[in-house]
Image: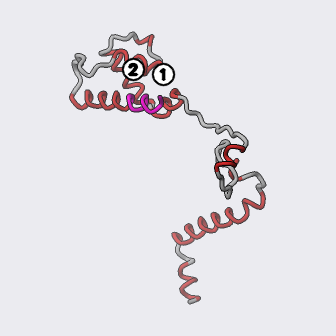
């Protein structure tokens, strides 16, 4: 048994894994001893409350109100859902086929870009030079924008 343990600890792969495991274990043990902040406050932004509270109807009526710090605006959702490549593709289509001047397009303002897109994009528009896959990718992008807008209200 002792010989097997000696042989295992000579393996560089095992040593790396063992060191990583030991560091994780030591962090889990010692971190709460040094950091006294509320762990739920570290993780969330006001969304978590103390666990173990059972709520009935009368407690709900008489309870204090809490405000959740969650950004539910449509602009924030658009910013998260539309990446930079989608925005540049939209701007490129609007310039080439939508008849929009390049000065009117700001890819950093997702709300204005989507408004321009909804006013000018048409899958039936004449799009010379585009292959079928590009046309379908623009249709999928338009459908995804519709889904984002419908879910954000």
Q: Which mark is residue 32?
A: none
**Residue hosting label 2:** 91
The quadrant of the image that shows the N terminus is bottom right
Closer to the camera, 86 or 144? 144
Query: Which residue does the image show at 31% across and 32% down from the upper left?
Result: 140
Dominant secondary structure (helix, strand or loop) of the stretch shown in magenta: helix
Across and down, in percent, residue 32 comes to 74, 60
Asked whether residue 147 is drawn in magenta, I would say yes
Query: Which residue does the image show at 53% across and 30% down from the upper left?
Result: 76
Disc 1 is placed on an element classified as helix
Asked whether residue 84 is drawn in magenta, I would say no
Query: Which residue does the image show at 56% across and 88% down from the upper left?
Result: 3
Closer to the camera, 90 or 111? 111
Question: Which of the 4 image quarters holds residue 151?
Answer: top left
Across and down, in percent, residue 141 comes to 35, 30
**Residue hosting label 1:** 111
Q: Is residue 32 above or below residue 99?
A: below
**Magenta highlight range:** 145-153
Q: Residues within 10 Å of mark 1 (few under 14, many from 20)?
A: some
Residue that extends furthest to the front in the rendered view of this protein: 58
Disc 2 is placed on an element classified as helix
Closer to the camera, 70 or 136? 70
Across and down, in percent, residue 54 comes to 66, 56
Please give left or right for residue 31 compared with residue 21 in the image. right
């Amino acid at each position: 048994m002792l010989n097997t343990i000696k042989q295992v600890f000579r393996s560089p792969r095992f040593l790396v894994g063992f060191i990583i495991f030991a560091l994780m274990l030591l962090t889990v043990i010692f971190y709460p001893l040094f950091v006294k902040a509320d762990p739920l406050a570290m993780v969330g932004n006001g969304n978590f409350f103390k666990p173990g509270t059972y709520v009935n109807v009368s407690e709900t009526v008489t309870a204090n109100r809490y405000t959740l710090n969650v950004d539910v605006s449509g602009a924030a959702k658009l910013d998260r859902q539309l990446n930079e490549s989608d925005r540049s593709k939209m701007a490129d289509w609007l310039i080439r086929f939508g008849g929009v001047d390049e000065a009117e397009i700001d890819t950093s303002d997702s709300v204005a870009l989507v408004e321009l897109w909804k006013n000018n994009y048409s899958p039936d528009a004449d799009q010379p030079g585009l292959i079928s896959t590009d046309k379908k990718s623009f249709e999928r992008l338009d459908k995804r924008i519709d889904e984002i807008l419908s879910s954000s209200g």
